[in-house]
Image (cartoon, rainbow, N blue to C red):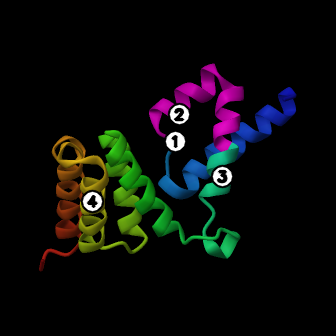
Amino acid sequence: MSDDTTDAAVQKGLASFMATFGRVPENFTLLAQHAPAAFAGYGLMRDFVMQDTAAGGALPLKTKELIFALLDTLAGQTRGAKNHAAAAMKLGVTVPELAEGLVQVIMVGGITTWNATGAEVLRHCAELSAAADPAT
């Protein structure tokens, strides 16, 4: 990749994070600073995946965020799972939908996925939901 192409791809990746999370996670900022070509490739892939249906994506963004939350849970990436689950909820995913997806993760990854990550993700999102709707 030429420097101009890399720079444009880095900017596209950073913009993708800002559009979906409102920030660029610290680990990705570090990657962009010290391995910009690697971040550029990741950023282009992320920009492609994180398109909502109105922008040409095949799946709704809330579904993609839920999928990432579940995949991160399966992989034991608690922080990422919590971030994606919270983003999914902002887009309309409910706590019962998240709970059902997390049960699917248990079915595939075993109870360890629940104990290591899933319970913390559900607890976090239940607290977010309660804070957003004190009547619950």
The majority secondary structure of the magenta stretch comes to helix
**At label 2, which amino acid type do we have?**
Phe
Q: Which residues are magenta?
A: 25-43
> Is 3 situated left or right of 61 in this image?
right
Q: Can you say which quadrant of the picture contains the C terminus?
A: bottom left
Locate residue 132: give its quadrant.
Answer: bottom left
Residue at left offset 77%, top offset 34%: 7
| Farthest-out residue, top | 34
Q: Earlier in the sequence, mark 3 or mark 4?
A: 3
Describe the element under mark 4 as helix, strand or loop.
Answer: helix
Q: How many marks?
A: 4
Q: Which residue is mark 2?
A: 28
Q: Position of residue 46 (x, y in %)?
A: 62, 49
Q: Is residue 135 left or right of residue 29?
A: left
Look at discs 1 and 4 and give the one toward the viewer: 4
The residue that disc 3 covers is: 47
Cα separation, mark 1 vs mark 4, equals 26 Å
Q: Determine the image quadrant of residue 14.
A: top right
The spot of residue 112 in percent (x, y) is 19, 42
Q: Quadrant of the N terminus?
A: top right
Residue type at tag 4: Leu
Mark 4 = which residue?
A: 102
Q: Position of residue 68 (x, y in %)?
A: 44, 53
Q: Earlier in the sequence, mark 1 or mark 3?
A: 1
Q: Is residue 21 above or below residue 58?
A: above
In whole angstroms, how far apart are the C-alphas of marks 3 and 4? 26 Å
